Every structure is written in structure tokens, then in C-alpha cells.
Image: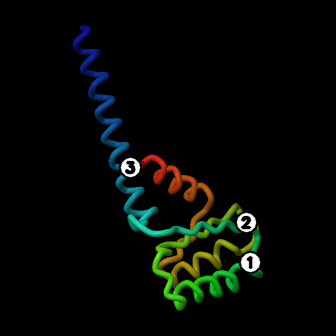
């Protein structure tokens, strides 16, 4: 009887571990997509629909045409805006490959995954 319980617990833990591994692989492939070296810039914005596009286009122009080699990705985090800030960020992220628009929860997960990889 004791062996059956131990085997049951073992298989439950093994399946849980398998699911966690699959979940992390899917997360890494879909959300982070970060390169292994370089400088990453995180910009936080809330309710900035009137200013965010001009700011980011100016910022990206200086990085892209300034031949900045060290900056690899720019992550713009929306802090639960009540206006169209996230819609503008999503549109800009389609125009620029180095720009990623995410909400603050996803940004926290990205930062936590970087901290755990050390």
C-alpha cells in the first residue's frame, strides 16, 4: 500500500514538472524572444496616447540611424492605461522589429525569467 502511494506521488510530481517545462518553453518562445547579449531598454508608459508615438519614433530614429550597436531590444510596458496607449504601442511594434509592446504583468515575467536564468 505504501509503495502505491509513493508511486502515485512520484507520477503526480513528474507530470507537474513536465507541464511546467512545457509552459516555460512556450513562454520563452512566444513572449521573450530576447537576444543573449546587448542592452535592453524598458520604457514604462501610462495614459500617454498624445506623446508616446512621437517620443518612440524620435528615440528609435536616434538608435537606428545613430548606429547604436549595443541596444538590442526596446520593451515598452503599458501600465494599465485607460486611453489608447496600448493600441499605439502595438501598432509601433509592428513597424519596428526591435520594439516590443507588452503589459506590466508580462514585463514582470520577462524580468523574473532573466533573474532566474543567472
Residue 107 vertical position relative to residue 13 in the rendered view, above or below: below
Q: Residue furthest top?
A: 1
Image location (x, y in percent) of residue 38: 45, 69
Q: Quadrant of residue 89?
A: bottom right
Q: Which residue is mark 2?
A: 81
Q: Which residue is mark 3?
A: 23
Dot 1 falls on a residue whose secondary structure is: loop
CA distance separating discs 3 and 2: 28 Å
Q: Is residue 55 above or below residue 1?
A: below
Q: Label 2: state its secondary structure.
A: loop
Q: Earlier in the sequence, mark 2 or mark 1?
A: 1
Dot 3, crowdedness within 10 Å: few (<14), some or many (≥20)?
few
Which of the labelled discs sits on residue 14, or is there none?
none
Q: Could you classify mark 1 by the number of other residues whose Cα lies within 10 Å: few (under 14), some (14-19), or many (20 or more)?
A: some
* Disc number for residue 49: 1
Mark 3 vs 2: CB contact within 8 A: no
Amino acid at each position: 500500500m505504501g509503495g502505491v502511494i509513493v508511486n502515485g506521488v512520484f507520477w503526480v510530481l513528474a507530470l507537474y514538472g513536465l507541464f511546467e517545462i512545457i509552459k516555460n518553453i512556450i513562454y520563452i518562445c512566444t513572449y521573450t524572444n530576447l537576444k543573449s547579449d546587448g542592452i535592453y531598454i524598458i520604457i514604462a508608459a501610462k495614459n500617454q496616447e498624445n506623446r508616446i508615438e512621437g517620443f518612440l519614433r524620435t528615440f528609435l530614429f536616434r538608435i537606428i540611424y545613430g548606429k547604436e550597436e549595443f541596444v538590442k531590444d526596446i520593451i515598452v510596458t503599458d501600465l494599465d492605461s485607460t486611453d489608447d496607449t496600448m493600441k499605439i504601442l502595438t501598432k509601433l511594434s509592428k513597424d519596428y522589429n526591435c520594439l516590443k509592446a507588452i503589459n506590466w504583468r508580462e514585463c514582470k515575467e520577462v524580468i523574473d525569467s532573466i533573474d532566474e536564468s543567472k
